[in-house]
Each structure stands twice: as C-alpha cells, then as structure tokens.
Image (tube, rainbow, N blue to C red):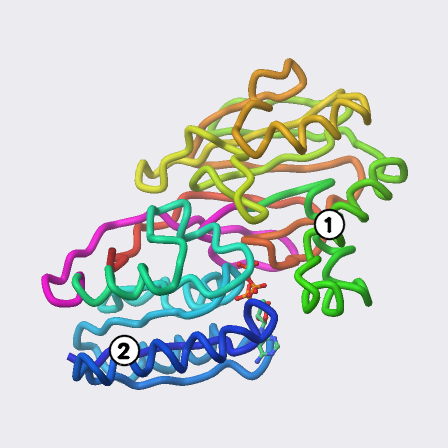
Amino acid sequence: MVLYFIVNPSAKNEKCKEIWKKIERALQHHHIRYHVVFTKKQGDGMKLAQQIAEQTYEPLILIAVGGDGTMHEVMNGVAMYDHVTVGYIPAGTGNDFARGINIPITWRKALSQMLLRVKDMHVELYDIGTFKGVKQGVFVNSVGCGFDAHISRKVNHSRWKHLLNRLYLGKFVYVFYLLKELFIYKPTVVQLTVDEKQYTFSNAWLVTVANHPYYGGGMKIAPFALSNDQCFDIVVVDNISRLKLLALFVTVFWGGHIRMKEVHTFQGKYIHICGNTSLPLHADGEQIGEGDITISVNKQIRVLK
Ligand SMILES: Nc1ncnc2c1ncn2[C@@H]1O[C@H](COP(=O)(O)OP(=O)(O)OP(=O)(O)O)[C@@H](O)[C@H]1O
C-alpha cells in the first residue's frame, strides 16, 4: 500500500523540513512506498488532503506531518471521506492532537509506532466536531471562545512571534500578551446551551469545548475529556479576578484549575455559545472569526494508531 504524506515544512519554526528529510530516509530504509506533497501556505493542507482523497475510492492512508494547524487542515479536507484513514506525525510546536490521543509526542517514536501500525492496520475511531459560526468546519482538539482566542489572535499577528520562535523563546510571546491583555480584555455575558439546557454567565472570560484534555501546547484544559466518547467536555471560566485568572493559567498545566469555584464544567453533544459582544473564536488554535457559534459531535474518523 502507498502511504500519502502531507508535510507542512514551515511547522516548528521551519524545522519540520529537516524532520521530513529524516522521515523520508526511514521510509526508504524500510522500502515503504510513499507519495509526499508539501503545503506552501495556509489552507493548502485542506485542499491537498481533499485532492488526495478524491483520487480513489479504495482505502488509503493519509499522514499529516506538522503541528495542530496542519492536522486541523488535513482533517477538514478528508472528514467526509470514509475510505480515508488518517495518521499523524507530530512535528509542530504544540502537538496537542498527539498528546490527546496518545500518539508519541516525538516524531521519531511516532514514526516507529506508525510503521508498526501500517503492518497490522491498527486503526482506532476518534471523534471529530463540527463548528458553524462565521466560518464552518471540523476540529479535532478544541474550539475556544473569548480570552484564549483573543490571546492567540494577538500572538499570531505579532511581529515578534517569528523572531522569538527562532530564538526558542516563542512561549514568551504568549506570556507577554497574556499579561498585557489580562488588564485590557473585558469579560462578557455568555449564553451557553448544552444539549437541551441553557446557562447564563455574567462575566465569562472563556468557554472551551474540548474533544480531549489538551490545548495551547500541553495545557490540560479539560482533564477528563475522552476523544472517543462521542461527547465534548465544556469548560467555562466566569466571574474570576484577574489575579486568580493568572493563577489559573499555571494550574491548568496539571488540570488543577477545575477545582476553582469560578470554573464550571459540562458535557454534551450539541453546544451553542452566544455572547453579548462578538466573541473571538479559534478552532484547534486557528482563527475562525468572531461571533456566535454552534458545535456538535460529527461522525468518528479512522486514525492509524
Ligand atoms: N509552507 C507554509 N508556509 C507558511 N505557513 C504555512 C505553510 N504551510 C502551512 N502553513 C500554516 O502554518 C500554520 C502553522 O502550522 P502548524 O500548526 O502545523 O505548525 P506549528 O504552529 O509549528 O505547530 P502547533 O500548531 O502544534 O503549535 C498553519 O496555520 C498552516 O496553515
């Protein structure tokens, strides 16, 4: 069987290019037949994945090499094709999808595991979600509304991001904007619908709808979320002081934040989020505009694991 690869050479501050060369050597060493295409810009992952999926109706394996943004795009390209099994080799800065479904976090180990799995075709089913707002699509990790989406938008537009990333100081850009925006961002009234029930939060900072525990490069935002239970875990942070919010961004690394009284958790399959101001939104860390959003559990997708 031929393996199809979609590689984002720019992931991990361009290091993915080098990682791919090593992966390619390993594939050749194991006499594995493969076909590779490279993304050149944002959006290519989805288009290329769709083109590959449409080449045949025979079963095929499509492996994304890059970060969560690459996986997000590839899934958006193939989610509707039942004959496609997806694989993932983490080669980005965050790699939360790998953490979330227990794929080894280093590309070397993930590749070794994948080569074993290709032999015995060990496939597992994982949930993917659908979002409908100003934009629509699918997500694999989480959809976030409010403060976290606001920070990631600021970071992505920052002039400093690429420079500091190259100096391995990328996390400082997040910390900088987190500290800065903490005193500027205004929490808002949020109406949340989870399945049939409605909740109102008067001072909501953020709402995250999570498919598995991790986001933001290892933060355990929804510690008990399972990626194969056809259900999402929802985390709302409401009515919290700015100082305590800062503490939350520390405790979230081990999931301790859920014990705070300002943190509310729910589980559901159908979620609608609506703010009294236009909420900034992200899906798997990619900006998806502002406004109200509806999220539901999509079908499951076959993942080589
Ligand atoms: N050739 C390219 N040049 C620039 N950007 C690209 C290219 N190909 C894809 N992209 C975009 O790069 C962005 C980041 O990619 P990705 O998320 O895979 O890597 P990362 O940011 O290093 O990892 P992570 O999201 O796990 O932190 C995505 O939005 C993707 O659309």
Q: Which residue in the rendered view is the most extreme toward the top?
A: 261
**Residue 53, image x and y in percent?**
31, 77
Q: Point out the frontmost of discs 2 and 1.
A: 2
Tell whether 137 sits left or right of 24.
right
Which structural element holds mark 1? helix
Q: Measuring 11% from the left and 67% from the top, which residue is drawn there? A: 119
Upstream in sequence: badge 2 or badge 1: 2
Question: Mark 2 packing: few (<14 Cα in 10 Å), some, or many (20+)?
Answer: some
Question: Mark 1 packing: few (<14 Cα in 10 Å), some, or many (20+)?
Answer: some
Q: Which residue is tagged 1?
A: 174
Q: Which residue in the rendered view is the most extreme toward the left?
A: 120
258 shown above or below 220: above
**Kind of residue at badge 2:** Ala
Residue 28: mark? none
Relative depth, front residue between 255 and 127 = 255
Q: Which residue is tagged 2?
A: 26
- Residue 33 figure quarter: bottom left
Quarter holding the N terminus is bottom left
Would the CB of label 1 be found within 8 Å of ligand 1?
A: no
Q: Measuring 41% from the left and 63% from the top, which residue is drawn there? A: 75
Relative depth, front residue between 278 and 2 = 2
> Is-magenta flag for residue 135?
yes
Quarter holding the C terminus is bottom left
Residue range of the region highlighted in magenta in the rendering = 117-142
Q: Measuring 57% from the left and 30% from the top, which residue is drawn there? A: 235
**Kind of residue at badge 1:** Tyr
